[in-house]
Image (cartoon, rainbow, N blue to C red):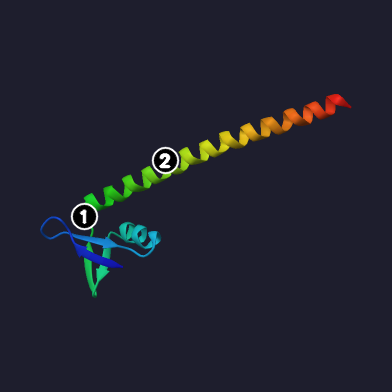
């Protein structure tokens, strides 16, 4: 975990080595730094909710594109199969 000073007074930016560590900290509502408990603000929690929302939307859009591509490939495959069956 890396910590650096934020842009504003009394703010810090925390970098977690794994995504799950950050999510776990937000769900708990605090992080531990040098044995001290630091409570997360409601703003921090909202930011995490928004980040998760946009991550899910991006995944959904990607999966929809992949499904369309796969559908097009299957359509071509079955058209070729149909031609083969009709030629026999």
Q: Earlier in the sequence, mark 2 or mark 1?
A: 1
Q: In this view, does 33 lie above or below 78?
A: below
How far from the left and from the top, in percent, is residue 69? 58, 35
Q: In this view, does 59 lie above or below 8?
A: above
**32 to the left or right of 8:** right
Q: What residue is pinned by disc 1?
A: 41
Residue plotted at (46% across, 38% down): 61
What is the secondary structure assignment of the residue under circle 1? loop
Residue plotted at (12% across, 55% down): 8
How far from the left and from the top, in percent, is residue 57? 42, 40
**Can you tell which of label 2 and label 1 is closer to the viewer?**
2
Question: Residue 82 falls in which quadrant of the image?
Answer: top right
Q: What residue is pinned by disc 2?
A: 57
Q: Determine contact: label 2, label 1, CB under 8 Å.
A: no
Question: Residue 80 falls in which quadrant of the image?
Answer: top right
Q: In this view, does 54 lie above or below 24?
A: above
What is the secondary structure assignment of the residue under circle 2? helix
Question: Residue 35 falls in which quadrant of the image?
Answer: bottom left
Q: Which circle marks residue 25 in the picture?
A: none
Residue plotted at (28% across, 59% down): 29
How far from the left and from the top, in percent, is residue 66? 55, 39
Instruction: Residue at the far top: name it.
Output: 86
How far from the left and from the top, in percent, is residue 37? 23, 68
Residue plotted at (31% across, 57% down): 26
């Amino acid at each position: 975990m890396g910590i650096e000073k934020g842009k504003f007074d009394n703010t810090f930016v925390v970098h977690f080595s794994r995504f799950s560590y950050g999510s776990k900290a937000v769900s708990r509502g605090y992080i531990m730094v040098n044995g001290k408990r630091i409570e997360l603000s409601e703003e921090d929690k909202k930011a995490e909710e928004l980040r998760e929302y946009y991550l899910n939307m991006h995944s959904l859009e990607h999966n929809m594109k992949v499904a369309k591509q796969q559908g097009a490939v299957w359509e071509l495959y079955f058209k070729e199969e149909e031609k083969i069956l009709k030629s026999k």
